Image (cartoon, rainbow, N blue to C red):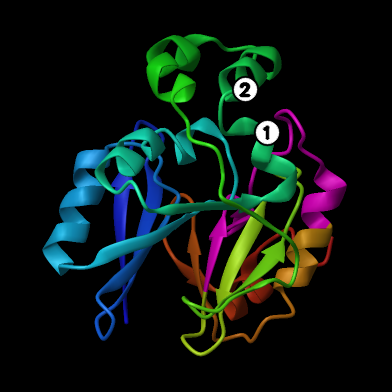
């Protein structure tokens, strides 16, 4: 098993490739931009994508989706149930109605209009048996935000819920400071040695965040 980070897009989003050498399979977490770089990483490892796993549907985590689906037509797309309306045929309309800064809408209009429909809606506690990860619903940054916890590997894809020394924004559409603090408390119950792989910035551990994150204990 391997995890490789590919930093993509203007917001330096962390896209991750989780691969299993024994099955030549991989899972793509948050393909935010630069599909050529993501596909190049997949080809380098000689693995075949099974699914795209989305921690949430902010534009900087999803705009490579159309190109990924074009390159791998059979790939599944998994997203938290409450975020699903920002994918598919109505996605661009939802973005247009909820975002005040239209700069990114103009820059990524084509990608957002071509976003595929999700194939699976995720709920809290759901097990993804093929990649051995558990879904943890972590609203606050977005209503349908989720994290993916791999117990055996002791790592967590935390999206924009938990960063090294911080948490995600809650002032965007659907955000809630109260909810993200509750989500943070849920994540702090994971084993301290769990490696946290966030949506932006460097990795950390649950123990490091328990000791140093100013939002822990709020």
The quarter of the displayed image where residue 182 is located? bottom right
Secondary structure of the residue carrying tag 2 is loop
Task: Let me know if residue 112 is in the magenta part.
Answer: no
Q: Who's the residue at 82% across and 67% down the image?
A: 217
- Dot 2 surroundings within 10 Å: few (below 14), some, or many (20 or more)? some
- Provide residue 18's location: percent of width, then percent of height: 36, 69
Q: Position of residue 27 (x, y in %)?
A: 39, 63
Residue 98 at x, y percent in the picture? 70, 18
Image height of 95 relative to 60, above or below: above
Task: Judge left or right: residue 201 versus residue 17.
Answer: right
Q: Is residue 150 above or below residue 45?
A: below
Q: Where in the figure is residue 1, as x and y percent of width and height?
A: 32, 82
13 horizontally vs 142: left or right: left
Check disc 2 and report the residue beneath it.
90
Residue for point 60% across, 76% down: 206
Q: Which residues are magenta?
A: 156-181
Q: Among all residues in the image, which is located at the extreme bottom?
A: 152
Residue bearing the label numbered 1: 85
Image point (34%, 36%), residue name: 33
Q: Could you say whether the residue bearing mark 1 is in a helix, strand or loop?
A: helix
Residue occupying the far front of the picture: 74
């Amino acid at each position: 098993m391997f995890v490789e980070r590919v930093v993509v897009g203007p917001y330096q989003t962390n896209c991750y490739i989780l691969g299993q050498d024994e099955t030549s399979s991989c899972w793509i977490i948050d393909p935010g931009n630069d599909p050529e770089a993501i596909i190049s990483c997949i080809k380098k490892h000689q693995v075949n994508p099974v699914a795209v796993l989305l921690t949430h549907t902010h534009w900087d985590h999803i705009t490579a989706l159309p190109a990924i689906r074009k390159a791998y037509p059979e790939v599944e797309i998994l997203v938290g149930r409450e975020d699903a309306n920002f994918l598919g045929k109505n996605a661009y309309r939802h973005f247009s109605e909820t975002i005040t800064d239209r700069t990114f809408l103009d820059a990524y209009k084509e990608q957002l209009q071509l976003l595929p429909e999700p194939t699976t809606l995720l709920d809290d506690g759901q097990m993804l048996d093929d990649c051995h990860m558990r879904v943890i619903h972590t609203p606050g940054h977005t209503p349908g935000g989720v994290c993916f916890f791999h117990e055996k590997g002791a790592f967590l894809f935390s999206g924009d819920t938990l960063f090294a020394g911080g948490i995600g924004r809650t002032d965007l559409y659907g955000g809630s400071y109260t909810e993200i603090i509750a989500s943070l408390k849920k994540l702090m119950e994971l084993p301290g040695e769990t490696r946290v792989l966030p949506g932006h910035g460097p990795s950390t551990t649950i123990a490091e965040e328990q000791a140093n994150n100013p939002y822990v204990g709020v």
